[in-house]
Image (cartoon, rainbow, N blue to C red):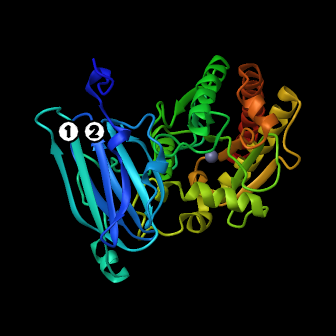
Amino acid sequence: MTAAETPGGLARVVPEYTGAEAAGGGVRLDLELTQGVPWRVFTLADPDRLVLDFREVDWTGVDPALFAAEGLGAVRFGAFRDGWTRFVADLDRPLAVEEAGLSVSALTGQASLRVFLAPVSEAEFDARAGAPEDPRFDLPEPAPVEPARESARDGPLRIVLDPGHGGIDPGAEAGGVNEAHLMLTFARELREVLVRAGFEVVLTREDDVFVSLERRVARAHRARADLFISLHADSLAAGVAHGATVYTLSESASDAASAALAERHNRADLLAGLDLGGTDDVVADVLMDLARLDTQPRAEALARAMVDGIASATGHVNSRPLRSAGFSVLKAADIPSVLLEAGFLSTPEDLERLTDPDWRARLARGVRDGVRAWAAADAAEAALRRR
Ligand SMILES: [Zn+2]
């Protein structure tokens, strides 16, 4: 087996012949793959992006710096959905796909993909932008949102855990750890603890794949969740913060840092190359929903109970542990939803705690205790509400 081959027949990017450079007033992009695969290319507007989709391509070891070229902005790539990977480059100016083709060498079997981007007017860029419809590549349609079910249900409470980020969107990165991977690990550990305590648990993702925010909420509805907990450990651009924080949804953020955090999360779908043109600001709409009048106080009570549970199990929470902002992932109108920032990867002491399995076990017990306390109080209140 040569170094270019990977077990299982997965095509791999060959970094030596891969990159981007300025050419003819535009940009030339070269991708060398160990074998030919189905692929497609298109551009998206607002913000302007170039998107390349591939079947089964392993990007391990590829440095985004290879694609540094005048006209191209930030570049990301990785798993998009099962069996499909995506490459997204931000465009600093309007550049349209002028030519694109993949040729396979009869000699080596290696495939060379070449894309020429040529400068066009903003109007022409907008006219040509858009994702071609292709069920082989596209994310499956989110399941339709089902109406709220009766609150009184027999059987165990069903908790949907939502490990943040994934695939092409790794989330925060620090000390060789990324948020997407760390939160999937924690979600699995927390699931064990919750299942042992008698709860039912469903995860919004089981692997390192991209799941859109809309789809995370749709999965909670489809699972008929009693509550939804999104799990994160972000980085902060400025300032030093440490300790766990629990966020609830609100139209106006509790503070500037929370607003920035929510905005960054809500952009994840755009950065991953989803075409969100035409979708409205759902958070504002959803707050008008009548169901939320009942759900929102329950979400806030859940957040308080989780903070209490985490504080007593780990001995530490953020100095302002309850915050709120317009997180799209918390928009389910009929499911009490909270977002747990387990800590900040950008803070060395948090990074040390988060990567320590013993500390995570205490955190998981804290969440369990909080959910338990909330469930008991919520059931008592539900009995009162029904009178
Ligand atoms: Zn995050």
Up the image or down, 278 lies above or below 308; here it is below
**Which residue is identified by label 2?**
33
**Which residue is identified by label 1?**
36
Q: What whole-number distance in Å separates the C-alpha atoms at marks 1 and 2?
A: 7 Å
Which residue is found at the position 36% from the left and 40% from the top?
A: 16
Q: Residues within 10 Å of mark 2 (few under 14, many from 20)?
A: many
Task: Tell me where residue 309 appears, x and y as whole percent.
Answer: 81, 32
Q: Is residue 108 visible?
A: yes
Task: Tell me where residue 148 appears, x and y as whole percent.
Answer: 52, 49
Q: In terms of secondary structure, where does tag 1 sit?
A: loop
Instruction: Determine whether, in the image, residue 320 is placed left or right of residue 75.
Output: right
Which residue is found at the position 16% from the left and 46% from the top?
A: 103
Looking at the picture, tell me which residue is in the foreground, 222 or 217: 217
Which residue is found at the position 71% from the left and 37% from the top?
A: 379
Up the image or down, 47 lies above or below 102; here it is below
Instruction: Determine whether, in the image, residue 266 is placed left or right of residue 364.
Output: left
Q: Amino acid at mark 2?
A: Leu
Query: Which quarter of the figure has residue 188?
Result: top right
Q: Is residue 155 visible?
A: no
Task: Tell me where residue 113 appears, x and y as whole percent.
Answer: 24, 49
Looking at the picture, tell me which residue is in the foreground, 225 or 324: 324
Instruction: Determine whether, in the image, residue 77 is placed left or right of residue 327.
Output: left
Q: In terms of secondary structure, where does tag 2 sit?
A: strand
| Quadrant of the snapshot with the N terminus | top left
Q: Is mark 2 within 8 Å of ligand 1?
A: no
Instruction: Determine whether, in the image, residue 307 is placed left or right of residue 14.
Output: right
